[in-house]
Each structure stands twice: as C-alpha cells, then as structure tokens.
Image: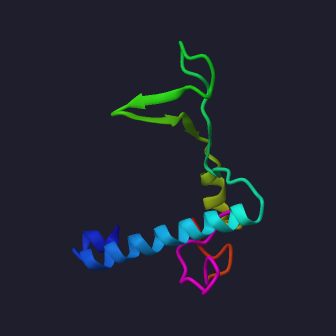
Amino acid sequence: MRALEDAQYEFATAEKFRLEDKQRRAAKAVKAAGRAWTPRWFDRAAPAPGEEDAESLVKGDGLCAPRWAFNERYWAARAAQDWSESPDIFGPALEGGVSGAPQGSGGL
C-alpha cells in the first residue's frame, strides 16, 4: 500500500505479483504435504436468518462464495507477535521454497 500511496506504481505492481506467486507456492506446498488449507483468521459463519445451514452461499454480482466470519484470533497473535502459524509470504523467496525469512519474523 505504501508504494501506491507514494505513486510507485511499477514497484507496487511487481510486489503484488511477487506476493501472489508466493501465496500460490505456499498453497501448493500445503497441498503437496497432504494437508488441507484452513483459514487462520476466519471461521465458517453461522447461518443467517432464513438460511438452511452455514454452507449457504452469499450471492451477489453473479458471484457465489461461502459465508465467513472474522474469528478475532488475529488480535491475540498480533499482541503476542506470534506469527508461527502464518506462512511468511513477505520475505524474499528462496529457490524451491516459500520464503527466505524465518517463521515468526513478521508473517501475516
């Protein structure tokens, strides 16, 4: 965001693509390890009045997606500066790896 605020559009675009690539590689690594990806900061939302279950979809603008609710766990992790459960997508990439920075060094 700071790059956009400073009108550094080329850098901001390059950084966006770098982060997206690291996110894709992190997701691929989770899948290759046989684990399922689960959101850390969101849980499936309880059904809204009139909905049958929590799997009900939000429909708007032609898009459908499950309902999610922020679970507040982010604030505890932030207060403790404990990012050990978060993949580090911000540090420099290593060849074949997801990140060059150790876990817990800033993370998400």
* Residue 91, image x, y percentages: 55, 80
* Residue found at the far left of this picture: 7
Magenta span contains residue 88 = yes
Q: Name the quarter where the C terminus is drawn.
A: bottom right
Magenta span contains residue 87 = yes
Determine whether 94 is above or below 24 in the image. Answer: below
Determine whether 102 is above or below 21 in the image. Answer: below
> Between 99 and 57, which is closer to the camera in this rendering?
57
Quarter of the figure with residue 106:
bottom right
Determine whether 107 is above or below 58 in the image. Answer: below
* Residue found at the far bottom of this picture: 95
Determine whether 26 is above or below 39 in the image. Answer: below
**Magenta stretch in the rendered image:** 85-100
Residue ID at (49%, 71%): 21
> Between 82 and 63, which is closer to the camera in this rendering?
63
* Residue 36, image x, y percentages: 72, 53
Magenta stretch, overall SS: loop
Please tell me how many numbered marks the rendered image carries: 0
Q: Name the quarter where the N terminus is drawn.
A: bottom left
Quarter of the figure with residue 23:
bottom right
Residue ID at (55%, 66%): 24
Residue ID at (78%, 60%): 34
* Residue 93, image x, y percentages: 56, 82
Q: Is residue 19 left or right of residue 71?
A: left
